């Protein structure tokens, strides 16, 4: 038999053996829950499209309204500002109350997150309670909390501090609990095996691993709180927001827009400072959006290369435990200590400039029962349930439509901002800079300007939410794409794929789960933000919420808050289910 015949016979016998194996190979079964999740996602997208059609954002009509803007600014004249001393005092007060409120939330979020995390919570009951506290505080609009605290405490910064702090607990504790659930259990179990206490397990085995995530979340929340502090001025919280609300209510648009410009610059500066703090404290490379673990061995690849080139080892080796305790004062250690003391000084200064009336904490208890009783039982007043319900539906439509616009735009901007997707560093850097500028614009200020141009209604609120969301979602998408595994990307490039093929074949599939989570987070945020934009005429239930608060109709306020709470809980439950199913 020839060699060719032998090869053919061997191939046939091999094929005969492989065929039964392929027939017996297990086939992946379709998961009914994954199918249900996909259908639910498609239904949600369909609702968003219908909402966008119903709101009827007309670009030609908006272009025609540019003439209204021109006439408005001609009538306003130029921008005006408060006196320099007063402007400085208002700016310092606003920053102080935001920093203090965020710190208040950061401290309280630690025990709540510890109880909410599945791997650290003592039992299911405490975990459920902690999770509910997080969802409840996240669902309560900070403007409603500010309304209540204005009734309980003296006018000033304290109602804003408490409103910002309590509202922020939900998001910080949620992100912190998620980080705790993803830790490496090795250090914690080692401490437990040596007889360590629960406190030692947390401070030595858990906290060092989650500290980067916690710091990043707190800084991010501080930026959001600064932009959100503007709306608190409409319910009596001192600061730039209150001064701006007075200006617009008195039709002094030049002063109102001048203060709005100051707030915008302040938000951009705070965003840049937060980025610098993240770089200094967490070792985050500027513009990359990826946190380097504080306790990883040897640091970043570039740092390891520098150490090797210097002829030293990447990991420090000490002759004895005593030598390890006497660490040398390297420039990195000095920088860390200096930044820690600066951060402490800023926190103390924030508390001082807030001018908190500490005696209020002794006297507000007597006011608490009647104030809480004024919100109950829920009552829709002269408006009736139908009108408030339809306004709530409009709020949801605004949130869905804005989320859809944001997602489409953010996919483009966020992709170009990711350094592993963008064609070059110039494009990624430019996209990052644009996202920072967009994030600096408070949605409320943008809504006011759009209302002036296009008039009252859902169009202005939707566009304001969509633009504001691009800054947030675009950054999250860019960070998620930069954090994917590089192996599949390199493999596609190695076989001759284009960057577009690499993106759709490797980057996007790996980041899909994060995209879903970020999109639901955006929708959750949009529902609350759409409520607040209604306060200045952006459509939805916010208009009725502000009128009820200013008219002391707190039973109607309680009814609206319950509707918002139910909506947010439904979105939260859907998001948790989809993340679990599509994981």
Image (tube, grey):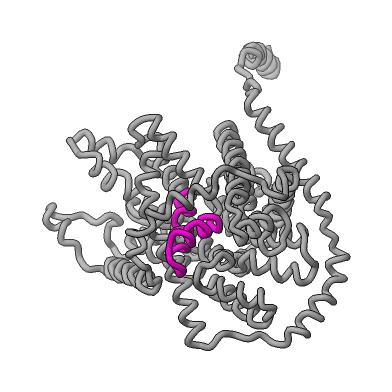
440 and 410: which is toward the camera: 440
| Magenta stretch holds residue 150 | yes
- In the image, what residue occupies the spot 69% across and 55% down? 406
Dominant secondary structure of the magenta stretch? helix
- Could you say which quadrant of the image residue 578 lies in? top right
- In the image, what residue occupies the spot 63% across and 26% down? 33
Q: What stretch is highlighted in magenta?
A: 142-170
38 and 76: which is toward the camera: 76
**Does residue 131 appear to the left or right of 477 in the view shown?**
left
Q: Is residue 221 above or below residue 511?
A: below
Image position, residue 150 (x, y; %): 48, 62
Image position, residue 96 (x, y; %): 42, 70
**Does residue 217 appear to the left or right of 333 in the view shown?**
right
Image position, residue 342 (x, y; %): 33, 71
362 and 417: which is toward the camera: 362
- In the image, what residue occupies the spot 23% across and 44% down? 200
Image position, residue 447 (x, y; %): 69, 65
């Amino acid at each position: 038999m020839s060699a060719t015949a032998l090869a053919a016979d061997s191939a046939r016998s091999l094929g005969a053996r492989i065929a039964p194996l392929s027939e017996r190979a297990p086939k992946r079964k379709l998961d009914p829950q994954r199918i249900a999740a996909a259908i639910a996602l498609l239904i949600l997208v369909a609702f968003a499209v219908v909402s966008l059609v119903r709101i009827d954002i007309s670009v030609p009509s908006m272009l025609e309204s540019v003439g209204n803007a021109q006439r408005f600014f001609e009538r306003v004249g130029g921008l005006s500002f408060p006196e320099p001393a007063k402007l400085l005092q208002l700016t310092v007060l606003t920053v102080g109350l935001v920093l203090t409120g965020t710190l208040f939330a950061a401290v309280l979020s630690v025990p709540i997150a510890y109880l909410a995390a599945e791997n650290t919570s003592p039992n299911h009951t405490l975990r459920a309670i902690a999770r509910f506290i997080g969802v409840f505080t996240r669902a309560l609009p900070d403007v409603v909390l500010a309304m209540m605290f204005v009734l309980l405490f003296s006018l000033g910064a304290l109602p804003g501090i408490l409103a910002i702090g309590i509202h922020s607990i939900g998001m910080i504790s949620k992100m912190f609990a998620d980080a705790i659930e993803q830790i490496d259990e090795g250090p914690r179990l080692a401490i437990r095996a040596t007889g360590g206490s629960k406190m030692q397990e947390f401070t030595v085995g858990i906290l060092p691993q989650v500290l980067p995530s916690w710091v990043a979340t707190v800084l991010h929340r501080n930026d959001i709180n600064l932009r959100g502090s503007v709306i608190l001025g409409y319910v009596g919280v001192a600061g730039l927001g209150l001064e701006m609300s007075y200006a617009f209510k008195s039709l002094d648009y030049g002063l109102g827009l001048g203060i709005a410009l100051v707030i915008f610059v302040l938000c951009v500066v705070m965003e840049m400072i937060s980025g610098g703090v993240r770089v200094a404290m967490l070792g985050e490379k500027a513009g990359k959006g990826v946190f380097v673990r504080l306790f990883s061995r040897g640091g970043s690849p570039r740092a390891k290369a520098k150490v090797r080139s210097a002829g030293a080892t990447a990991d420090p080796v000490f002759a004895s435990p005593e030598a390890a305790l006497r660490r040398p004062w390297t420039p990195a250690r000095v920088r860390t200590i200096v930044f820690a003391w600066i951060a402490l000084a800023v926190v103390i200064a924030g508390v001082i400039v807030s001018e908190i009336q500490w005696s209020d904490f002794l006297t507000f208890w007597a006011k608490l029962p009647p104030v809480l009783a004024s919100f109950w039982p829920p009552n829709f007043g002269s408006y009736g349930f139908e009108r408030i319900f339809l306004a709530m539906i409009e709020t949801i439509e605004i949130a869905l439509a804005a989320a859809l616009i944001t997602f489409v735009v953010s996919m483009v901007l966020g992709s170009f901002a990711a350094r592993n997707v963008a064609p070059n560093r110039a494009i990624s850097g430019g996209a990052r800079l644009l996202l920072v500028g967009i994030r600096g614009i408070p949605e409320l200020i943008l809504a006011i300007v759009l209302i002036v141009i296009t008039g009252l209604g859902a169009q202005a609120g939707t566009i304001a939410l969509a633009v504001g969301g691009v800054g947030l979602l675009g950054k999250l998408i860019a960070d998620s794409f930069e954090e994917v595994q590089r192996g599949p990307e390199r493999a596609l490039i190695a076989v001759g794929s284009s960057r577009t093929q690499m993106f759709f074949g490797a980057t996007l599939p790996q980041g899909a789960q994060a995209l879903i989570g970020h999109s639901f987070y955006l929708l959750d945020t949009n529902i609350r933000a759409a409520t607040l934009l209604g306060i200045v005429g952006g459509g939805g239930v916010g208009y009725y919420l502000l009128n009820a608060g200013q008219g002391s109709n707190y039973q109607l306020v309680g009814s609206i808050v319950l509707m918002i709470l139910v909506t947010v809980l439904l979105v939260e439950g859907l998001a948790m289910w989809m993340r679990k199913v599509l994981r």
